Each structure stands twice: as C-alpha cells, then as structure tokens.
Image (cartoon, rainbow, N blue to C red):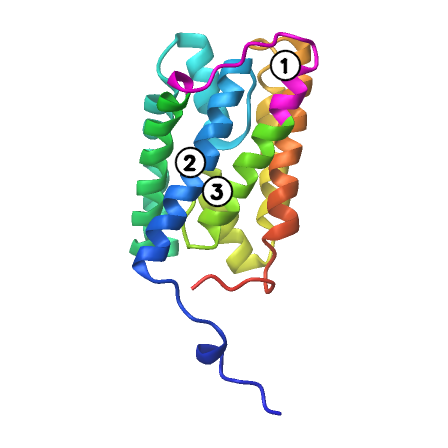
Amino acid sequence: MSTPPLSRRFVPHTVFEDILAILTGTLFVSLGVALFNQAGLLTGGTAGLAFLVHYRTGLSFGTVFFVINLPFYYLAWKRMGWKFTLKTFCSVALVSLLSGLHPRLLHLLDSHLLTPFYVALMGGLLMGVGFIVLFRHQASLGGINILALYLQQSRGIRAGKLQMGVDICIVLASLSVVTPIALLASVLGAFALNLAISLNHRPGRYMAM
C-alpha cells in the first residue's frame, strides 16, 4: 500500500482545540509555578528569572514573568510566525494571571523536610505536561522556550535537552536566594520538567499542525 499524503495523515487542530489546549496547558504550568512559589523553590528559563526577581524584590511573579518575556516576541514573530507569537503571548498572559490565582485556592501546610522534594517532583511534572500541551498546539511560554523550539525545528536539537542545560545553570545561579535543601529540590524539579518534555516531544514523533 502506498503511503498517504502528509495532508491526509495529519489533521490540523481547530481554533477551538487550540483554545482548550492553551487553557489546559497554562492551568497545569501555573499550578506548578504556584506550588514552587509556596515551597520557595526555583525553576529555569524565564520563569526562573522571574522567581529570582520575585524573591529578591517582592514584586509579583506574574508581573515580572510577563515583562521579562516581552523582548522574545520579536524572535518568535520573525522565526515562528504570527500565529505562534499570538498563542505564546496569550499563554504567557494566562500563566501570569493564573499563577496569582492558585494560591488563593491551594495552600501547602506540611513543612516536613520531604515536602520541597515532593513539590519539586509533582510541580515539575505538571509544568512539563503543560509545556507539552502548548508545544503540540504551536505555542510556548516565551523566552528560552522560543529559542528551544526554534533550534529543534531548524537544527534538530531536542527542546528538552537544551532547556535542561539552561535551567540547571539558572538554578545554580540562585545559591544566594534559596536554602541548600530548596536548591536540591529545585534541581529535581528542573530535571522532572525537562525529562517529561524530552521523552514526549521529539522531532518526527508528533506533528503539531
């Protein structure tokens, strides 16, 4: 049997599907961010930079995260197209908003030593799954994600591996901000997040349309 044309094998996502996916992905990511924030943990990418500024200055994470991402939209527009840029802008705005809403509904009460590691694992996996949902609908959360997706498409470099390296560098740069226990937990969270992306978002395995 002959192989069906590419257009027949892959059905593009509808606008409604994209909207639902962006809502789902940003809910997952923002919940992971809220968990990290309440446990005093850090992550990588632009979110990690936003956490550093938030912990040092007390400014709202959502506000800082939204502002830090603004310069990266130019690269997204030039390299990834206006649809990707629009979806990414909406995703960043939703995470900025929802990350401040979750703490009003969810609180971490257990201060046991293992709590940071549990939060790091669960929060990292939540964010990783959220990123995958966004990636597969041609959206991201700006910053390093835009660069990672661009290099994956143009160079075949796995987005998860690149992001993992950058994230670990950012977490290590936070030594003066968090405790050693929180730092170790943050490294675990970064590993869990990027492992989820690396295993489930490979070039040629899934075609996002």
| Amino acid bearing label 2 | Leu
| Amino acid bearing label 1 | Ala
Please provide percent x and percent y for residue 58. 39, 9
User: Which of the numbered marks, if any, corresponds to residue 145?
Assistant: 3
Q: Is residue 206 magenta?
A: no
In this view, 83 is above or below 8: above
Q: Nearer the viewer, mark 3 or mark 1?
A: 1
Q: Which residues are magenta?
A: 103-120
Is tag 3's residue or tag 1's residue first in the polypeptide sequence?
3
For residue 137, which quarter of the picture? Answer: bottom left
**How many residues crowd around disc 3 within 10 Å: few (fewer than 14), some, or many (20 or more)?**
many
Query: Which of 184/157 is in front?
Result: 184
Residue at the (59%, 60%) spot, across then down = 203
Please provide percent x and percent y for residue 135. 47, 50
Q: CA distance from mark 2 to mark 1?
A: 24 Å
Q: Is residue 117 magenta?
A: yes
Q: Circle 1 sits on which residue?
A: 182
